[in-house]
Structures are given as structure tokens and as C-alpha cells.
Image: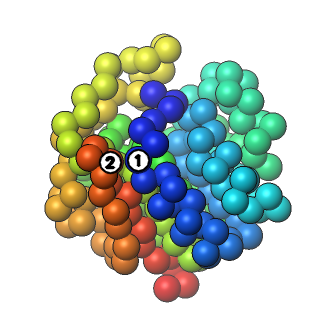
Amino acid sequence: MPHSSPEGKPWISAWIAELKPARILDIGAGAGVYGQMARATLPAVHLAAMEIWRPYIAGYGLQDLYDQVIVADARVTLLPPADVVILGDILEHMTRTEAAALWNKARRAARMAVFTSLPIVPYPQAPEIGGNPHERHVVPDWTHQQALAAFPGIIASETGTEIGVYMAGGAAE
């Protein structure tokens, strides 16, 4: 879904407030939840969105929230450099191998930090929501321990009842 569980979002928001990045790349922007959160925390931040499903851009007004909107599949697209990269609620939409590769790619693009939010309990999702074939949860059963093992460089994390949030340092680490 272009929306997600609220678990972990205050944790990510607090880190963004502490880091004070000048540029944020929100991969898998969906309805713009992480962009709204970042804009509320740092009104002058330069926000870029990368969204695979073009209808979400007009449907959720992403062009009005973000300074730049890129329609692309992050798995196969060069990521623009940013201080912080957010992989918000998207890694469960790809294979474990693709998720790990995108995590590493995001770490190379991020100067300061990479964040992700991931279901850590069985969290199946319908094959297609609103016509978007990318909404299916390919791996609906990550665990916290699997996330820690799959995503190198994690320096902080928090788990809720259904969501784990993770932070790694970026390329300048």
C-alpha cells in the first residue's frame, strides 16, 4: 500500500532531526509519508522522491511535496547522491537478494545515513493494490534477526510489534 504502519516513523523522524541532512532521497515514496515527515522536521530540506508507480505522483500530489520526483525502479537506476536515503516500506516488495543489493546501493549514495522500515512479522499483502503490481509483498516474513544479517552497517534499530526500523551509516561513515 502507498501507506504503511505508523510504527517506527517517530524513531526515523527523530534521527532525521538529529542529523539535519540538507538532501534526502525517499525511495518508494508512495503517498509521501516520509516526505511529509521530513518536511515537517526540516522545512528547508531538499527532498527527492523515487517512485516506481507513475500514478502515485499525481494521485498523491508528490510533485507538490518533493523538490524532485524521479519515476524509476531503484533496483536498476543510478541513485542520486543525498545526505540521507530512506527505503521506506519497500524492501518487502522484492526478493531478499534484491533488498540487500538495494540497501548496499543506498549506502553508497548516502553521505550520512540510510533508513529502512520493514515488517518483522508475517505481513502478506495482496498481489496488486489499486492496479499497482509492485505492491505485492514478495518476502512477507522478514524477522528482526534476518534484517540485521541481511543489511550490513546497521548502527541503530528499533522494533515494534510488527515493524522494525534500521539505520546504517552512509558512504562518508
Q: Residue at x 57, y 60 (%)?
A: 13
Q: Residue at x 35, y 37 (%)?
A: 93
Q: Nearer the viewer, residue 29 or 6?
A: 6
Residue labelled with disc 1: 7
Residue 25 is left or right of residue 137, and the answer is: right
Q: Position of residue 76 (x, y in %)?
A: 48, 48
Residues marked 2 and 1 touching at CB (< 8 Å): yes
Question: Callout 1, which amino acid?
Answer: Glu
Task: Check the picture and name the quadrant holding the N terminus.
Answer: top left
Residue labelled with disc 2: 163
Q: Is 66 placed above or below 136 here?
A: below
Mark 2 element type:
strand
Q: Is 29 placed above or below 55 here?
A: below
Residue 11 in view (yes/no): yes
Instruction: Using the rendered view, name the quadrant where residue 162 is placed.
Output: top left
Closer to the N terminus: mark 2 or mark 1? 1
Instruction: Using the rendered view, name the quadrant where residue 158 is placed.
Output: bottom left
Q: Nearer the viewer, residue 54 or 169?
A: 169
